[in-house]
Amino acid sequence: MRQPDLTKPHRVNRQWRLAFKWVSAHTGTEPSLVTVELHPHDDGTRLVLSHERLPAETVESHRGRWGAMLERRTAVLAHWGLFDPM
């Protein structure tokens, strides 16, 4: 499986948006596009992750994997006192 090349972002807005191409064994032959947006929110910051250009049959599995990955990152940050999950 090829890992994303995070050294070459597709698009970056330094204040709130990062978009990068993602290729894996589960995304088909063409690169997909992952976008991470950070938005101010009353209780902190809201993260919005979207994954476009995926083969239709892989959308649900990617949704579950991204959700699980974000939950693990949240737990690690909370463990080190870098995030308050409320």
Image: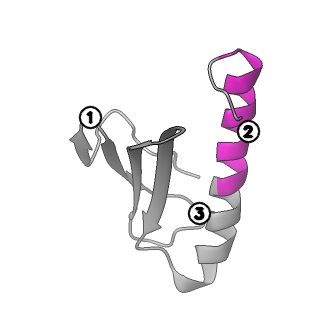
Task: Give neighbour class at mark 1: few <14, some 14-19, many 20+ (Cα, 10 Å).
Answer: few
Does residue 79 belong to the magenta stretch? yes
Task: Give neighbour class at mark 3: few <14, some 14-19, many 20+ (Cα, 10 Å).
Answer: few
User: Which label sits on residue 59?
Assistant: none
Q: Position of residue 40 (x, y in %)?
A: 40, 41
- What residue appears at the point 59 percent right and 75 percent down from the top-left corner? 59
Magenta highlight range: 67-81
Does residue 22 belong to the magenta stretch? no
Type of the residue with mark 1: Gln
* For marks 3 and 2 on the same chain, the one whose residue lies earlier in the sequence: 3
User: Quarter-wise, where is residue 56 in the image?
Assistant: bottom right
Q: Where 75 falls versus 46 (above or below)?
A: above
Q: CA distance from mark 1 to mark 3?
A: 32 Å
Say which of 25 and 49 sits in front. Answer: 49
Q: Are marks 1 and 2 in contact (CB under 8 Å)?
A: no
The residue identified by callout 3 is 25
- What residue appears at the point 39 percent right and 37 percent down from the top-left corner? 6
* Badge nearest the viewer, 1 or 2: 1
Q: Position of residue 53 (x, y in %)?
A: 40, 73
Asked which colour scheme the image uses, the reply is one colour
Type of the residue with mark 3: Ala
The residue identified by callout 2 is 72
